[in-house]
Image: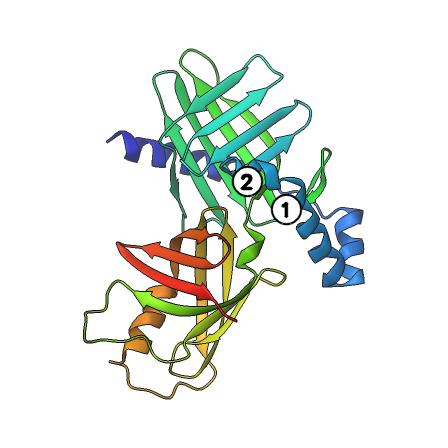
Amino acid sequence: MRFYCWVAWILLTASCTNSERVSKNSQEIKLDKEGAKERVDHWLLLQERFSKDRQDGVDFIAFGKNPDWQLVITKNNELSIATKTDFGSFGAPNLEGMEPQDLNAMVYGAQTQKGTISVMVFSDSCLSHEVGLLPNRVKISAQKADRAVAQFIGCGLYLNDPTLHDIWAVRSWSSLDSTEKIPKGAYLEFNMQTNRIYGNLGCGEITGYFDPMGSRLKIYRMDYADKNCAEESISISLFSALNFSTHELIIKDGLELRLISNGDTITFIKAD
């Protein structure tokens, strides 16, 4: 019951604040005119800047000014926010996330004995006074036990492992039995410069999109250029397991990739 009350509270907050959008700033317009390369270089520099935080277990980081605040979400679903306001600081374990159908956002929330917090992470570019242009617009609503709701607006980014940007050969899938085999030559290529997927799972060339979100990876809108095998094939089943799903992402030593969703694990190894 507490979870559903939290969901209702978040969506109410979103509907009240979603009309406030960050206008396109001159820096972003300049990047648009000069092409994708400058934007890509900027994102890669940002990932390098926060690589220490990622190695320390941070999945998402966000900032804001007037008033000043900083928020961190870890791989262990722990949240902490520090502000230079009367609200002070707030921390919560067991953060829960959802993707509302009517919002182009990921929504996180938690309720503790000390209060309630929701964090909306929108897929909109945003200008941060601290570090410049960031890929996500952030809105936070939080309330401590006996205080009014405090709201904070700013910018953030997911901290992603750059080794994902490569070609990965499918090695195994936990859903297969001992008599079934991964199609020979099956692979996926993740292009982090464009958030596009390319590859072949055994039924022809495919393309699609992905959103890297720290320790999670959302894959969607994969499609075939020319599908050439039956619907009941292992390749089609593997395609369906990957597409339109958010997977737990584990990269081991930059050489092994695991995508985990609904109890299934798909393992890849870096292609030579």
Which secondary structure lies at badge 1? helix
| Residue pictured at 45% horizontal, 32% vertical | 118
Against 196, residue 252 (above or below) is above
Given contact means CB atoms under 8 Å apart, are the residues at marks 1 and 2 in contact?
yes
Q: Residue furthest bottom?
A: 228
Q: How is the image coloured?
A: rainbow
Q: Amino acid at mark 2?
A: Arg
| Residue pictured at 61% horizontal, 63% vertical | 194
| Residue 88: mark in rendering | none
| Residue pictured at 45% horizontal, 20% vertical | 143
Q: Is residue 134 visible?
A: no
Position of residue 250 measured from the top left corner of the image (x, y, whole percent): 42, 51
Quadrant of the image occupied by residue 37: bottom right
Position of residue 5 measured from the top left corner of the image (x, y, whole percent): 31, 31
Position of residue 141 measured from the top left corner of the image (x, y, whole percent): 49, 28
Which secondary structure lies at badge 2? helix
Residue identified by numbered label 2: 54
Position of residue 262 measured from the top left corner of the image (x, y, whole percent): 27, 54
Q: CA distance from mark 1 to mark 2?
A: 9 Å
Q: Earlier in the sequence, mark 1 or mark 2?
A: 1
Residue identified by numbered label 1: 47
Quarter of the picture containing the N terminus is: top left
Against 91, residue 74 (above or below) is below
Please name whichever residue, 82 or 192, is drawn nearer the observer in this view of the structure. Answer: 192
Against 229, residue 158 (above or below) is above
Q: Is residue 202 visible?
A: yes
